[in-house]
Amino acid sequence: MPLWLEHLLEDPGLGLELVAGRGGLRERGPVRWAHISEIPDPTPWLEGGEILLTTGMGVRDNPTLQRKLVVGLAARGCAAVGFGLGVCLDDVPDAMLAEADERALPLFTVPYEVPFIAVTKRVSRHIFDEHYATLRGAVDLHRQVLASVLSGSGVDGVLATVTRPMPGFAYVLYDYYGDVLAQHEAGGLTATAALWAELAPELLRRDRVETSVDGRVAIGSVVRLGDQVEAVLVLVGERGLHEHEALLLEQGLAGISLELARGLSAREAHRQRVDDLLAEVAGGRLGHLALEQQLHHLGVDPAGYEVLCIARPAASASGAGGPVSERSLCALVEHAVMACGRPVVGRWDGAIHCIVAPGGDAAERVADAISGRGWAHLPVGRSRTKRTANDLAAALREAEVAATVPGPAPGGVRDVAALGLSGLLAGIDDALGARAFVDHVLGRVLEHDAREGTQLANTLRAYQRHGCRPGPAAGELCVHRHTLAYRLDRIRVLTGRDPRDGQHLLAFGLALELEARSRS
C-alpha cells in the first residue's frame, strides 16, 4: 500500500509533529520520495510527491525567501515539508507556517536528535517494500494466469483472475472485428460495446489509449499474437491505473494472448470462414438463401457490395517493407478497410479478396497501404457494384481479372469497368454458355491448330490486336503478308466467318477473349 504522511507522523521512533498545512494531508497524495536541500529554490530538481527536508539555512532571516520556498514546493506538487529544529533555527519561521496553511502544504518538525537520514531511510524502506510486494504480486498473478489458461477456463477465467485485484474496474474484451468476447460490470460501471467505435481508430495505431468516456476513464490495450493485433481489452473506472495495476494489466494481456493462441486465432478463424464461403460460391455449391444468410452473418449487405482483389505474390516477392507474405497481406487489407466497415477478407484462387460496401474509398485505402509498405507492384482489382447475393461469383472473377490483367503502370486501383473487352467478359462463366460460344465460333480453328500444329488462332489474335491491319500483324508474327492472308482465308473456310468482314469482328473478339480466360 502507498506511504501516506500520517504513517510517518504516527511513527514514535521519528518524533515528527505536524505544525501547519493540515488541510493537505490527503489532498497532496502519497509520499513518493524524501529529498534534502538547503538552497532557496530546490524545485528544479523535484518531480512531485516528495517530502523536502530542510533546516532553513538557505532562507534564514529572510521572510520573503521563506514564503517563496513554500509557494514553490506547493506548486511543484510536494507531499510535505520537514523542518529540522535546532540546527539553524530553534523554531519554524512564522512566514513559512502562514504560507503552509495558506497553500495546504503539510509542514512538520523534525527533532534535533533525529537525523534527516532516519526519515529518508524510513521512506525508502517503505517504497522498496511496496515495489517488492508489487513484483511478488505480479509473479503470483502470472502463475495464476498460467493456471487459468491451462485449466481451459477461457478468456473469462483469465480476465476474472486478472481483474480480481482491481475491483473498481469494469472491462470488455473485443476481437479484432469489434465482436465482444467477454465483459464484466463492476461498481455500477459498464464497459459497453459502443466503446469499440470510440477507441478502435486510435488503438489500431497505438498499443495503449487512455481517454474519457461519459465522465469516466477508459483504458484500451491491444492484445497481439506475434506482430498481429488479435483483440482489444478496455477497462473502465473512475480513475486511471496505479503503477501496480498497470503491471497487473500487462499480465492480463499476456494471459489473454496465451489463451487466444491455444486454438485458432479469432482473426484467422474469421478469414477461414470467408475462405470457405468464397470456395463454395466459386464452386456453385450455395443456394441463394444460404448465400444471403452467410453474407449477412459476415456483415455484408447483399443488396449492394463490391469485391476487391490483390493477386497473391510469389513466395520470394518482397518490397521495401520486407517479404510479402499471405498473412501480412491479409492483415494489411483488414487494417486498411477497417474504417470503411467490418473487414471481410479471404483467400481464393491464389489471391486475396475483400468484400466491401460500394461507392467508398476502400480500394484506394488498400492501394495506399500496399504502397506504404513498399509493395507498390501489387495492383488492387475492383469489381462492378453488385446488387444480389447470386452475383458474388461474377464479382470475384471481375475483381481478379482487374487485378491480373497487365496495366500501364504497376500497382494502384484497377476497375474492371475500365478494362474494355476484358472487363466486359470478366463476370461471364461457363454456366452462361461461354464454352459453347467459343466452340461455336472458334472450335474448328482450335481443333485444326491442335491437329496440324498451325497458328491460326494466334494469327487471328495478332490481326485483331493491330486493328485488322495486315502489315503490323504480319510483322509481329514474322511472316509474309501473303502468308497472313492465306491464314485468314483458311479461318474463313473453317468457320464460315471472314475475319476481314466487320460484322464478324465482335464474335471473333469475344471468342478469343473467353478462350484465353479459360486457359489462364
Image: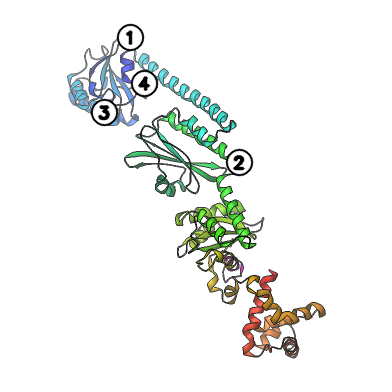
- Gap in angstroms between the C-alphas marked 1 and 4: 16 Å
**For residue 39, which quarter of the picture?**
top left
Report the quarter where the N terminus lies. top left
Question: Residue tagged by mark 2?
Answer: 263
Q: Residue 346: tell me if it is visible.
A: yes
- Looking at numbered disc 1 in the image, what kind of residue is underneath it? Pro
In magenta stretch: residue 101: no
- Looking at numbered disc 3 in the image, what kind of residue is underneath it? Ala
Question: Residue tagged by mark 4?
Answer: 3
Left or right side of 44 for 129: right
Q: Main secondary structure of the magenta part?
A: helix
Task: Indicate the position of residue 421 as horizontal and vertical percent values.
Answer: 59, 77
Q: Earlier in the sequence, mark 4 or mark 2?
A: 4
Q: Earlier in the sequence, mark 3 or mark 1?
A: 1
Which portion, as a residue range, is magenta?
Answer: 399-408
Q: Are marks 1 and 4 in contact (CB under 8 Å)?
A: no
Q: Is residue 486 above or below residue 182?
A: below
User: Residue sitting at 31 percent across and 18 percent down?
Assistant: 6
Callout 3: SS: helix
| Label annotation for residue 74 | 3
